[in-house]
Image: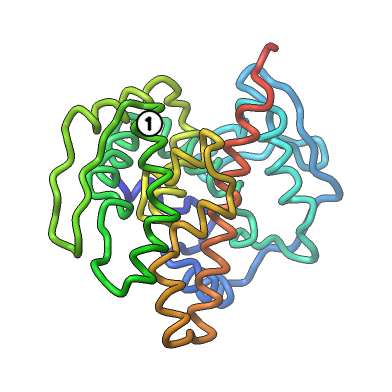
Amino acid sequence: MRDILKDLEAGNYLSDPDPVRRAQIQMKTPLPKRFYKAASVSKEAAGFAVHLDGKPVRTPGKALLALPTEPAALLVASEFEVQKEVIDPVSMPVLRLANTAIVGVAVDPQAVLEDILRFAASDMLCYRADAPQGLVERQNTHWDPVLDWVQVTLSARFNLAEGVIHVEQPRESIAVLGAHLARNANPFRLAALHVMTSLTGSALLALAADAGELDVDAAWLAAHVDEDWQIEQWGQDAEAVARRSHRKRDFVAAAALLGALEQEKIGE
């Protein structure tokens, strides 16, 4: 199922789960020149469609590129607007998410929902270090409030473990998360949540950010507690810095799409 959530980019563009590798591939592929003067949004029966010089944009599968709310469609239009001489899909994460939602997730949203739940069943926040004490305290500081929020707000309790030995989570808790996701199983929302979950390794962080319990920067910081600890001890190389930057861009874009989906509903 995760195959349908890979980037769905037009033409002969290639994709790779690693954003740095994807960028390297794109650099080897001639990018199309910008052929339009302006990007805009128009309300259609299917939602809010993105237009280039008055003509509707199509997904790689030839479907109309239409999003549920005007703010969401404007995010895509703005990505087209900021393109310069060429159109670089790597720099258009909301467009890629929209394509994925329309061409992939909409075909089988339940499968995507279940994939998010599989992450939750082995959520990163449940696996704690037993040492050093500084790392233990940092994990507690960033992760415990999220688990407390899940328990209080969603009535879902999660078991903790030290190290990497698998710990079984209560079926009731996974079912509660499933019901929470199912209440608004919009393909665009599921696509964004899946991206945020896969980038962080934590469905709980993605859900907390979606609910406004954490802002984007706090959620990203919480997702990298272990990595930041290692960086403080050993440093990092330039490629790791670039990879993290690209991943954060995609995470921020997914969070922005979630926010835009809630700003304005069709027909309201």
- Determine the residue located farthest toward the right in the rendered image: 37
Q: Is residue 48 above or below residue 242?
A: above
Q: Is residue 3 left or right of residue 100?
A: left
* Quarter occupied by the N terminus: top left
Residue 266 figure quarter:
top right
Q: Secondary structure at mark 1?
A: helix
Q: Amino acid at mark 1?
A: Val
Residue drawn 59% across the image and 62% down it? 90
* Position of the C terminus by quadrant: top right
Q: Nearer the viewer, residue 211 or 161?
A: 161
Estimate the x, y position of residue 57 in percent, counting from the top left: 67, 39
Query: Based on the displayed image, in which of its 4 quarters is residue 260 positioned?
Result: top right
Position of residue 263 measured from the top left corner of the image (x, y, whole percent): 68, 27
Q: Which residue position holds label 1?
A: 107
Total number of numbered discs in the rendering: 1
Percent x, y of residue 175: 24, 27
Q: Residue at x 77, y 42 (%)?
A: 52
* Label 1 neighbour load within 10 Å: few <14, some 14-19, many 20+: few
Q: Residue at x 54, y 38 (%)?
A: 62
Q: On the rendered structure, is 255 left or right of 82?
A: left
Closer to the camera in the image, 234 or 86: 234
